[in-house]
Image: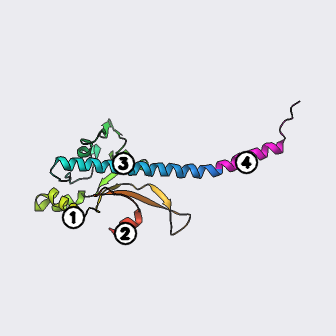
Amino acid sequence: MRRAFTLLELLIVIAIVGVLIAILIPALGAARRTAHATVCQSNLRTHHTGFKAYQDSNNGVMPFTRFPFRLNHDLLTPVKEIADHLDAPMPRLEGDEIITGRPWTCPADRKGAAEWGWSYMYWPEPLFSYYEMDGNPAGKVTAMYDADPTETLFADVYPGHARVSTVEPGNYEHAMFLVRYDGSVERVSERGYWGRR
């Protein structure tokens, strides 16, 4: 005759399962954040590849724009120029809903892609407006970037990559990824990055 579990044995098993779950949940969250970061970096490298292909087809000049990309306002630069040189469909509108995906959407972004169709920012965009009065703004901005290839080209619009703060253990600070003109991808603290600008 088979002996049944006692109440004590059952409680011990439940406690062990609870401890294992408590150990696994943070590890799974960390794995998810790592996966998000990897996809975001890959997206930025893809942006850079499309950007350089555009430049190669346009005498080395950068895509010109005076406005941030806004799909629902028909402001498509530079995503359209990049998409034309990649095997990636453009974000699109279906009624009021924005349909987008890789490489335009960062998985850690909970706001930008849903509102505008793109999770990233084309960093030179304000410079084009600044140089527009002088004529040939695309040429002037391109020359600036050629002179300093460490300048930021694309960055997260809504940084959502949390990491443990080194200043205050246990606290989280937001981090953002950016790709520089030379193609290098870097993870920086949002607070530290904006403090240097």
Q: Which stretch is magenta?
A: 1-21
Q: Which element type, helix, strand or loop, lies under badge 2?
A: helix
For the residues labelled 2 and 3, the Cα–Cα distance comes to: 25 Å
Residue on which disc 1 sits = 147
- Horizontally, residue 140 falls left or right of residue 185, namely left
If you read the primary sequence from the N terminus, does the residue marked by circle 3 or circle 4 appear first? 4
For the residues labelled 4 and 1, the Cα–Cα distance comes to: 61 Å
Residue on which disc 2 sits = 195
Q: Residues within 10 Å of mark 4 (few under 14, many from 20)?
A: few
Given residues 126 and 61, the one toward you in this image is 61
Q: Residue at x 58, y 52 (%)?
A: 26
Residue on which disc 3 sits = 43
If you read the primary sequence from the N terminus, does the residue marked by circle 2 or circle 4 appear first? 4
Q: Quadrant of residue 134?
A: bottom left
Query: In front of the other: label 1 or label 3?
Result: 1
- Label the magenta part by its dominant secondary structure: helix
Give the vertical position of 189 relative to 87 (above or below).
below
Tag 2 near tag 4, CB within 8 Å: no
If you read the primary sequence from the N terminus, does the residue marked by circle 4 or circle 1 appear first? 4
Q: Is residue 144 magenta?
A: no
The residue positioned farthest toward the right in the image shown: 1
If you read the primary sequence from the N terminus, does the residue marked by circle 2 or circle 3 appear first? 3
